[in-house]
Image (cartoon, rainbow, N blue to C red):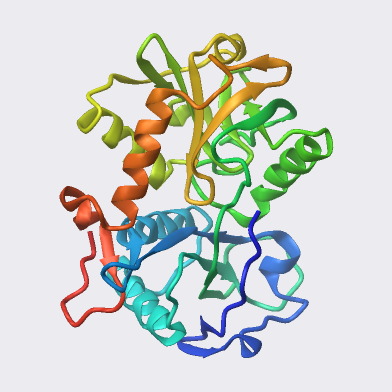
């Protein structure tokens, strides 16, 4: 992973403040019990236009509000208001590079007691310079994790719940300490669900398959966008269905997508090469298209982007 810079500011308790002032106490409910939800967004710098584009912020904030509702958290703002807050924060930061954005809504009372009702809520957001989430986006070596993806009847899989990411941390650390770049995770039924924090796509005989949302996958914004690009721009058939472990071994291509990982090829699973052992044609095509889209170089998809440095009205969708 590339070195990360630090933010100068955060939106905290209703205003933009220096990062050092955006602090919580050790008794904060979310810190003790994992009772928070978060989002992950990226902004991409377009040097030709001297513009920073945020990818689908309105959709990301709608999902944050949905996640918060599952945890009985009142974010306190609409998705459109959150886009405006984010835009003000990024203008204060003045970034001229690619960035990662982290909004959080959480139970903020300083108290002991395991519950969600009658606990105060709060919202914060910060952003920082950010490069690659994984070093080998062009060719990951992964293994299957012994851990299972958290089940929707245990912790809502559709929500980005902070406490649930202990599951992701166990998966990722065990994979990397075993020598892999990442891990694929099965659900309780034994079908492929996700990577530690990314959605999975498998290509077989020109058809692209991805696990359905009922396989305990996060309803990813990048996942949805990649499906649209595969179907509408690359004219490929995309099927959402259960995927067996052995289908991954015999796939022609496998790739991951997500805000952090972006679009990354898997070229080896355990001791088996995927296809030729190199990034496949379909993966390369959708990856190149994705980066054109998020950097503002695909005119048909400018409506997915919100420009930060502009006097024009920001686009919410």
Residue 160 in picture, x, y percent from top left: 54, 51
Q: Position of residue 308 (x, y in %)?
A: 31, 75
Q: Quadrant of the N terminus?
A: bottom right
Residue 66 versus residue 202 in the image, above or below: below
Residue 188 % position (x, y): 64, 23
Q: How many marks?
A: 0
Above or below, 107 against 270 in this view is below
Q: Residue at x 42, y 83 (%)?
A: 94
Relative to 188, does residue 62 appear above or below in the rendering? below
Identified at 80% across, 37% down, the residue is 174
Which residue corresponds to the image point at 50% horizontal and 30% vertical from the top-left? 255
Q: Is residue 222 above or below residue 202?
A: below
Residue at the image point whose x is 77% and y is 39% from the top = 176
Name of the residue lying farthest toward the right: 177
Viewer-proximal residue, 47 or 313? 47
Q: In the image, 257: left or right of 164?
A: left
| Picture quarter with the C terminus | bottom left
x%, y% of residue 212?
A: 43, 26
Q: Quadrant of residue 227?
A: top left
> Which is more toward the observer, 26 or 178?
178
Say left or right for 85 vs 104: left
Closest to the observer, 282 or 317: 282
């Amino acid at each position: 992973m590339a070195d990360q810079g630090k933010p100068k500011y955060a939106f905290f308790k209703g205003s933009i403040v220096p990062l050092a002032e955006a602090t919580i106490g050790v008794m904060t409910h979310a810190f003790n019990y994992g009772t928070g939800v978060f989002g992950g967004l990226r902004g991409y710098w377009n040097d030709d236009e001297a513009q920073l584009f945020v990818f689908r912020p309105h959709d990301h904030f709608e999902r944050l509000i949905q996640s918060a509702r599952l945890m009985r958290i009142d974010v306190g703002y609409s998705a459109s208001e959150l886009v405006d807050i984010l835009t003000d924060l990024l203008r204060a930061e003045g970034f001229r590079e690619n960035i990662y954005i982290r909004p959080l809504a959480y139970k903020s009372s300083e108290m002991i007691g395991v519950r969600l009702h009658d606990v105060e809520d709060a919202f914060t957001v910060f952003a920082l310079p950010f490069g690659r989430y994984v070093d080998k986006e062009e060719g990951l070596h992964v293994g299957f994790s012994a851990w299972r993806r958290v089940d929707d009847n245990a912790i809502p899989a559709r929500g980005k719940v902070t406490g649930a990411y202990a599951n992701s941390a166990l998966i990722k650390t065990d994979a990397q300490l075993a020598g892999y770049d990442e891990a694929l995770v099965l659900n309780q039924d034994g079908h492929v669900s996700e990577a530690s924090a990314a959605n999975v796509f498998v290509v077989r005989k020109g058809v692209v398959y991805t696990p359905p949302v009922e396989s305990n996958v996060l309803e990813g914004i990048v996942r949805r966008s990649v499906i649209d690009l595969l179907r509408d721009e690359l004219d490929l058939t995309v099927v959402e269905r259960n995927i067996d472990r052995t289908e991954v071994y015999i796939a022609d291509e496998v790739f991951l997508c997500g805000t952090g990982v972006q679009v990354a090829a898997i070229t080896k699973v355990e001791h088996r090469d995927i296809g030729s052992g190199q990034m496949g044609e379909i993966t390369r095509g959708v990856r190149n298209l994705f980066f054109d889209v998020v950097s503002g170089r695909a005119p048909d998809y400018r409506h997915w982007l919100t420009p930060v440095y502009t006097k024009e009205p920001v686009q919410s969708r």
